[in-house]
Image (spheres, rainbow, N blue to C red):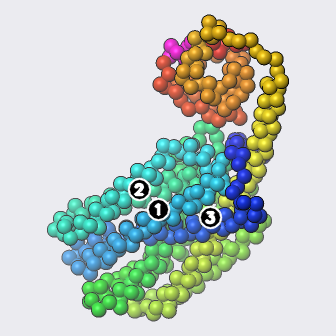
Amino acid sequence: MSDFRIIPGDIPLPLPTMGLEFMEPFFHGLLIVAWVVHILFINVLLGASLASVYFNSKGHKEKNPIFDRVAYLLTTPVTISENMGALWGVAPLLLVSILLTPLFYSSSIMISPHWLHIIYGNVVAFLLSYLYKYTWHTLEHRKTLHIFIGTVGVALFYTLPLAFMANVQLAMTPSTWTYTTHFWDALLRADTFFRLVHFYLATFAVTGVFMLVYGMYKRKSDDAEDHEAGVVLTRTGKTWFIIPTVLNFFVGPLVLFSFPDYGIEAFFENGYFWGIILTVALALFALYQLLKDFFNDDLPAKRVWTVVAVMIVAIISMASLRHGMRMGLVKPVLDASHAKTELFQKESMIAFEEAKNAPVAPVITQADVQPGQVLAEKHGCLACHNVDIKVVGPSYKEVATKGYTADQIVELVKNPKPENWPGYMPMPPMPQVPDEDIKQIAEWINSLK
């Protein structure tokens, strides 16, 4: 376990399996399925919103009502997908919280407050997307403003995966953690970058498949404008699927081999190599189906549904590969975390029994309590520190052995240095505590030597 600088403690609660052995594998399977449904809606949301703004701008520039119609038609899957994506996002979030509790919550703390961008970024982007859709006819003669509203909403949507991917990638790679790891550390790493590129390319590919289905139905319309819009959707869908899928054949290996070595070894030892072969074969078959009819605007329905079915299997296969890599990366640290928690519980029970059987301490009167101790309790210091034993942080007697001056303790309270105390949870800065109060607390701590 020398690869791991930090081993987080676990919450000593069993999984809610109701005593049934198959429930834990069921949770893992449910995570894969829920994640696939969630990510497909997110893919369509991102791809369709960008395509709508693009065709809106193109239609306005070229004075082409067909492109304008395509742009308007794409607002419907955007509003549906943003709601369904958020709804289906709850399930994998809860399952990850249960299965990977110490890792997911630790990574969320490391990248806060940027993690909160998922909330307020979503809220603003949702509102802008609805404003964009429902002012379509109202702002018909103010297209520049209308396109600007849509562009800002799309830009916000495209920033959300940055926060999400940084958190997920950090939770998957605990071997990279340090006491000073933050959002930009996680975001600007090679593995996070390659996964983002892979994700955005997959977004366009999935949206391309959606456009094929949407275009197929619109081509059947008796309305001439909708029929032509269906042709545009079909043409665009083929291009959007083919180009990103081919590019991902090259990006995929970069994603795989950017993970830590021990995770890659576990991935191949568990036989996931065959999953890669299956996924690539399915994607190649889907490409072949579209390339042989690339110039046919009236793509047969059978061909479209074949591509959809093949890609659903390929996506489930990819999601299973992703989960296999994740579990290979986190299993060693989860095992160490469970062992650490069991040891902590054992030591805590021993300390409890010793304290219970120890002689009763003399009653301390108010006159015996030093001002520093009173202030430590007032400012919440005693929630994480104890005089004699370590709690969340080190005991004050242990701090006293460091020989810090009062001024040094003031600086450490304002700007904690977790590297000085390996093995403990990092202390948050406490700028709200007055310097004079900290100095009195420091005098009390140093009196405990």
Mark 1 lies on a secondary structure that is helix
Viewer-proximal residue, 440 or 204?
A: 440
Q: Position of residue 413 (x, y in %)?
A: 56, 24
What amino acid is at disc 2?
A: Asn
Mark 3 lies on a secondary structure that is helix
Q: Position of residue 34 (x, y in %)?
A: 57, 67
Name the residue: 61% across, 15% down: 373
Res 402 seen here: no
Q: Position of residue 149 (x, y in %)?
A: 28, 60
What amino acid is at disc 3?
A: Leu
Q: Mark 2 — residue?
A: 122
Cβ atoms under marks 1 and 2 closer than 8 Å:
yes
Q: With 75 as the anchor, is 349 left or right in this view? A: right
Q: Mark 1 — residue?
A: 86
Name the residue: 81% across, 37% down: 346
Query: Which segment did they paint magenta?
Result: 435-440
